[in-house]
Image (cartoon, rainbow, N blue to C red):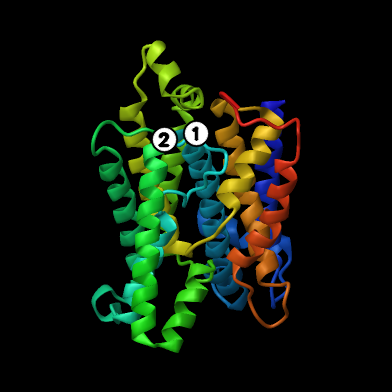
Amino acid sequence: MYVGVSIVLLAILFLSVGLAVTKGSVDISIGEVYEIIFYKLFHVGNEDILGSGAIHDVVWLIRLPRIILAISVGAGLSVVGIVMQAIVKNPLADPYILGVSSGASLGATIAIMFGLGTVLGSNAIGVSGFIGAFTVSMLVLVISNIGGRSNSIKLLLAGMALSSVCSAFSSFIVYFANDAQGMQTITFWLMGSLAGAKWQEISIIVPIILLGIIFFSTQYRTLNLMLLGDEVSITLGSNLNKYRHIYLLITSIMIGILVYSSGMIGFVGLVIPHIVRMVFGTDHKKIIPIASLLGAIFLIWADVLSRSIIKGTELPIGILTSIIGGPCFIWLMIKKTYGFGGKN
């Protein structure tokens, strides 16, 4: 079943890319889409027709980068959500649980309100969000190790404390800056968007996210053990503290990159892992690859909806994922047959 579902999801993902590129203000057939893609990748076809022109620009320069970014963000958030839930042994954990979202928000707020664009360039908000998210993640690690080795409870408490501090500083800066336009920019960024996708950034983002997913796919035994808790793992001769630190460092880099590229997109890293666990159980060997594929497909179509649901404008994708994800998560919570794994 697992192999069959994986093959089906891969086929759906491949088809979704072609179909999603056709959706928009300009009607393009799926045949034209794949002709342009194959020409750009393998130089197959007529250069005069496929190598330039309005359709080429819409497919290759605007829509396809956005869809590739959606795949990376959806897969990355889903896998990081699974890993975070194992690290803190909490089914309510999501990629932003350890204060990452508040750190990113503080970084973005500083960039907008203090005009850091002259220093960090045109993507100052994303760069500052990455710095804020990564800094908070590292501080969580440091604080959770004060007074003894960290564990899942200390990580959660440290994350909650730093999240409150970052939120307070963000509010403080916004209050005294009195900048209505800056407030609007921050709010829109925090809602998430894939509109700024460019091939130059994708060439960096995709390899990092892919390497992270591959790494965690090889760590399924340790992640399975984390669901049982530190006490059980010690009796089995394995100390999870070292692995927890390594995993948090890698997830922090992944989340920082995703925040940099798309802002804050909620519920993907919370709902997708639970849906996959409900069908395939709690074995990370199976659920990590499946969740990455399902998360990628979900975000592709969420992005298509976000730019087509209201004619003439684009709905921030974070709003849409929350509208979809909230009811789905409530439904999952009331399912009596569903279990998180380990000691429930």
Q: Mark 2 points at which residue?
A: 152
Category of crowding for the residue at label 1, using alpha-carbon neighbours closer than 10 angstroms: few (below 14), some (14–19), many (at least 20): many
- Residue at 29%, 55% (x, y): give it: 135
- Quarter of the image where the C terminus is located: top right
Q: Which of marks 1 and 2 is nearer the N terminus?
A: 1
Left or right: 140 as drawn, with respect to 297: left
Total labels drawn? 2
Along the viewing direction, whichever of 315 and 51 lies nearer the viewer = 315
The picture places residue 229, in percent across and down from the top left corner, at: 46, 24
The amino acid on which the numbered mark 1 sits, given as a three-letter code, is Lys
> Answer yes or no: do the residues labelled 1 and 2 have beta carbons within 8 Å?
yes
Answer above or below: position of 4 versus 128.
above
- Which residue carries the number 1 mark? 89
Q: Is residue 33 visible?
A: no
* Secondary element at tag 1: loop
Horizontally, residue 212 falls left or right of residue 43, namely left
How many neighbours does mark 2 have within 10 angstroms: few (below 14), some (14-19), or many (20 or more)? Answer: many
Whole-percent x, y for residue 171 in the image: 39, 73
Q: Is residue 162 left or right of residue 96?
A: left
